[in-house]
Image: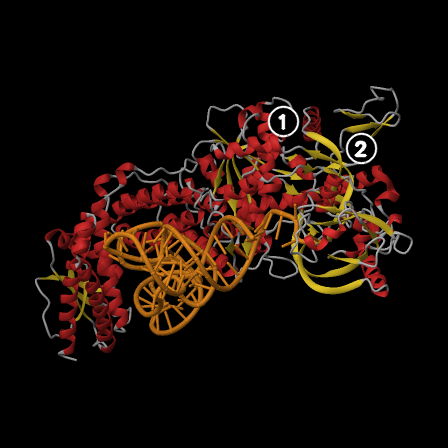
Amino acid sequence: MSVKDELAKAYDPKPVEEKWGRFWLDEGLFAGEAKSPKPKFSMVLPPANVTGILHMGHALCFTLPDIITRWKRMQGHNCLWLPGTDHASIAVHNVIEKRLAEKGLTREKIGREEFLRIAWDWKDKYAGVITGQLKKLGLSLDWSRERFTMDEGFSRAVIQVFVSLYNEGLIYRDYFLVNRCPHCRTVLSDIEIEHQDLRGKLWHIRYPVEGSDEFVTVATTRPETMLGDTALAVHPDDERYARLHGRRVILPLQNRPLPVITDERVERDFGTGAVKVTPAHDPVDFELGKKHGLDQVIVIDGAGRMTEAAGPDFAGLDRFAARAKVVEKLTAQGLLVKVEDHEHAVGHCYRCRSVIEPHLSWQWFVRIKPLADEAIRAVEDGSIEFVPANWAKTYFEWMYNIHDWCISRQLWWGHRIPAWYCRDCGRIIVAPAAPAKCDRCGGPVDQDEDVLDTWFSSALWPFGTLGWPDETEDLKAFYPTDLMSTGFDIIFFWVARMIMMGLKFRGQVPFRQVFINGLVRDLKRRKMSKSEGNIIDPLEMIDKYGTDALRFTLAALAVPGMDLALSEERMAGYQAFANKIWNASRFVLMNLKSERPGIKDVELTLADRWIRSRLAAVTAELQTSLERYKFYEAADLLYHFVWHEFCDWYIEFAKVGLRAGNATTEAVLADALDRILRLLHPFMPFITEEIWQHLPGAGTSIAVAPFPVAEPGWADEAAEKAMALLQAVIVETRTIRSENRIAPKDKVRLIVKRAGREETAVLEAQAASVKTLAGLETLELAAGLAEGEGLLKGVAGPFELGLVPGKPADVGQERDRLQKDLARIAAEIGKIELKLANADFVAKAPAPVVAENRARLEELQARQAKLARNLAGLAGPA
RNA sequence: GGGCGGUUAGCUCAGCGGUAGAGCAUCGGUUUUACAAGCCGAGGGUCGCAGGUUCGAACCCUGCACCGCCCACCA
């Protein structure tokens, strides 16, 4: 491609994204190398849910690490970023079972085998949707290593982990009260339950005391569970109920005698101080039941319907219908004392939002404490670092209070539990492959019907994807990974478990750092949700504003760990930025001959030296920001530098140099653009690649071009000071013009009173540039400004300016402005004088601070004097 | 009940001990040959409240208020 190729007048992202997206993949630029002398940088992408559709949360969570990866790659790292998908068992079940239901079918009717066939078809068809959408984000993923949590190798890893934990006694089977979702028809772990405060009722029910006319009143939020009561509990020291110790009460509706037990866990102040105990349907009661040896009567089944044990009046009823009927019957029998409003937390399924039912059943559990202890240590000793650090607290809080993890699910889509039960002797065999027969009695065996929690398999993602349990080259080269980027909502679900499993099975942490990004919200700070209708769809945004604009927006809003408020306006702003880059590049390319001229130091103009000095500084600052994952800071830095320094000042100065035929300025311009593109590339990969490829001497791809380093020789304090001086003169002149309504086409004379020798020399040398940028007819240096000639006066740094307009100006505005300025300066002077008058300040503040204040005071006083003179000059002739 | 975060310009947010910042929005000017998705200029804030530490506090400490999350077995 040659420089002569015209760039379109406005940037059109679509063809560019299409072209380079394909190019990067075709060239294999993002493939990690198992054998490489370069330092490695590896990450695994949080596996995308196969039922998923790309949303803004993904866009954020993936764009930020992509910035890091692209940056590392350009710095010469051997980068691997491995993508993949997650089988998402409950979500897939919900989708498929809903479809079956539409045809009047259930999974039980079609059977396990047929169901799995449908699920695999479905997965093959739809997993591509999410991965296709991921590709549109321009992520530098190594698709040649894409994995799926149920692919052959990964499944082998899952089974091996299960077997090995079982053999070590870290996985066990138990008859336990667990959470069950009646809708999804599976049990769930504790963290899959979302507690929500609901306004409910507290029903007060009288239980007759056996062999007397007395009653005891208990309070409950779930009257239907009383059918399964097996005791009544009071606090041992509660004198109100001392008379009941050792006696029995009669359970209404069931006419069953219940023992009265005493336990310190009963809160005397809550309700009536007497509590019904239902070991099969309440977690606390379950424990009380175990402690006191109570019966466990199951009155609600796994589908949320009342069982035979609930009695003929209730059997078969839905739990909520049963509640109404229980209340009705109690009322009829005069046993309902009162009903109070009562707000309390109710558990809901995190997938379908149904009310959770405590459910007594045989399940598999991970004995988690030993794993958690190691995982806690890894964060405590800094082997793993949370960014921002305060998320470690959340992690610790959960880890210290962790409960055993229920990992069996009554579902079919997933990794089937590798446990077999002997039909004859009941022996449990846990093995990687099906045993032919019982190894104890030779009887036939049946495999456990359940599958494993999806999170059990995703916990192995960082090493399972790299080939474990085989000692592959990839595993050796890329484990442990360097960074994990994810949302705080899955710290417990996923991050903590990866740490535990990584340490257990690799003896090493799965990643060095965890970057926690915030939630994407709308401008009113609401969570984005379909029902609210406030979704900002990333694909739609890409379509409207371009991927680069979307990425830059996300980066610019990304304060580590903080939620961000996204708006389309913001994206439009960064689309404009992309366009600005585009046009600045067009300008540079238009002025560039087909080969880049060399840079001769002696030919460097002041502006050339200045932009190189700034470039060096910005490059260094960017480095710091990225190292700390301060994406917003990095984005802001680049935005400001490119737009307000490179475009607004340097290009304008360079025009003067170019007109004079300065080849070095041409070269500096091209070199600065080249560097700017490379600095921007991690944030805006597409537009930077497109433009960069137009530069003479471009390499294969900007994605593998070296990331700029701050050139130590480019820092140039003198140039920065001189530029500040020129900018002050130019801005002051423009302000005077604007305030006095001097039309831009009116060329004015500017008279500058000479100041210090060096400063005056700078101005003199740069007169051509100043004239162009300030729109001057002439720039004259004088020993003083004539008074009373209707000069419009201003102050710029050490200079006093006098402006002579072609036409007489409206001086009223100017007077207002001067007066305002003076007032402001007087206030500031007052503040500083007060400070300096304070003996404590002068004595105790560090010397440089005091000196700074003195200098500032002097400067302000000088400015005040000049402005006052200007005002007086105005007042005269006006 | 425990824990975490927030409160700074109209909006969204930086700043976290020494002159209050950005983007957008607002107002005024402007078709200057890279860009009107532009250019030039301007206005706008006792940094939630009350105490304290300090020569000095938006920033550190204490308390309070209001918002938002997370965890939790008062039925």
Local packing at callout 1 (Cα closer than 10 Å; few below 14, some 14-19, many 20+) is some
Residue A492 visible, this angle? yes
Secondary structure of residue under mark 2: loop
Chain under numbered label 2: A
**Cα distance in 3D space between marks 2 and 1:** 27 Å
Q: Position of residue A535 (x, y in %)?
A: 60, 58
Q: Is residue A95 left or right of residue A38?
A: right
Of A175 and A505, nearer the camera is A175
Label 2 vs label 1, nearer the camera? 2
Q: Label 2: which residue? A: A448
* Residue A763 sits above or below residue A392 on the image: below
Secondary structure of residue under mark 1: loop
Residue A662 visible, this angle? no
Q: Give the mark count.
A: 2
Chain under numbered label 1: A
Q: Position of residue A13 (x, y in %)?
A: 52, 51
Q: Is residue A337 left or right of residue A508?
A: right
Q: Quadrant of the C terminus of chain A?
A: bottom left
Give me the disc on residue A467. 1
Q: Position of residue A739 (x, y in %)?
A: 27, 71
Of A462 and A173, nearer the camera is A173
Q: Amino acid at mark 1?
A: Gly
